[in-house]
Image (spheres, rainbow, N blue to C red):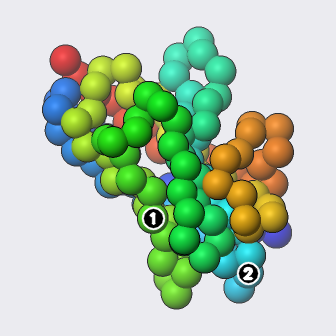
Amino acid sequence: QVQLVESGGGLVQAGGSLRLSCAASGHTFSTYAMGWFRQAPEKEREFVAGIRGNGANTDYADSVKGRFTISRDNAKNEVYLQMNSLKPEDTAVYYCAADRPNTKTIMTVRGVNYWGKGTLVTVSS
């Protein structure tokens, strides 16, 4: 069982930055690929970014490439999402996800093993 707790959401103006963090419980963090998803009001949950267990490879949704960066610290059992140049369309609840095998970088909603409860990001225009 893996528990994931997100933090760092909030209200930011368009063009600003936020850094999301996700803390994971347990001693098997590096055996999971980690990712971030988001869900805007009345929309389906969508993949944002994913990172391999050893941190060597990452993938991003086209909508965030060049603006968002995912990273992880296996010593701290944490994964991060640095979000720059935020746009109003980035407004959503952001969810941390853990998946196996740890070689994955792209995740699907149905395939995720564990979810956090989410943190709200609101970008004002």
The one nearer the camera, 84 or 22, is 84
**Residue 37, image x, y percentages:** 58, 40
Q: Residue at x 74, y 76 (%)?
A: 31
Q: Quadrant of the C terminus?
A: top left
- SS at mark 1? strand
- All told, the count of numbered labels is 2
Which residue is denoted by mark 1 in the rendering? 71
From the viewer's perspective, is residue 40 above or below residue 105?
Answer: above
Q: Residue at x 48, y 77 (%)?
A: 73
Residue at image coords 67%, 78% = 30
Q: Position of residue 59 (x, y in %)?
A: 55, 49
Q: Is 89 positioned to the left or the right of 94 in the image?
A: left
- In terms of depth relative to the viewer, which is nearer, 94 or 70? 70
| 48 over 7 or under it: above or below | above
> Which residue appears farthest toward the top when viewing the image?
42
Residue 33, by quadrant, is bottom right
Q: Amino acid at mark 1?
A: Ser
| Tag 2: amino acid | Thr
Q: Is residue 4 visible?
A: no
- What x and y, as percent, mark residue 117? 61, 47
Can you tell which quarter of the image residue 80 is in?
A: bottom left
Tag 2 residue:
28
Q: Choose mark 2 or mark 1, whichever is in front.
A: 1
Q: CA distance from mark 2 to mark 1?
A: 17 Å
Classify the position of the N terminus by image quarter. Answer: bottom right
Sequence-first tag of 2 and 1: 2
**Coordinates of residue 29 in the picture (x, y in percent):** 67, 76
Would you call the spot at circle 1 few (<14 residues within 10 Å), some (14-19), or many (20 or more)? many
Residue 23 shown left or right of residue 106 in the figure = left
Q: Which mark is residue 61?
A: none
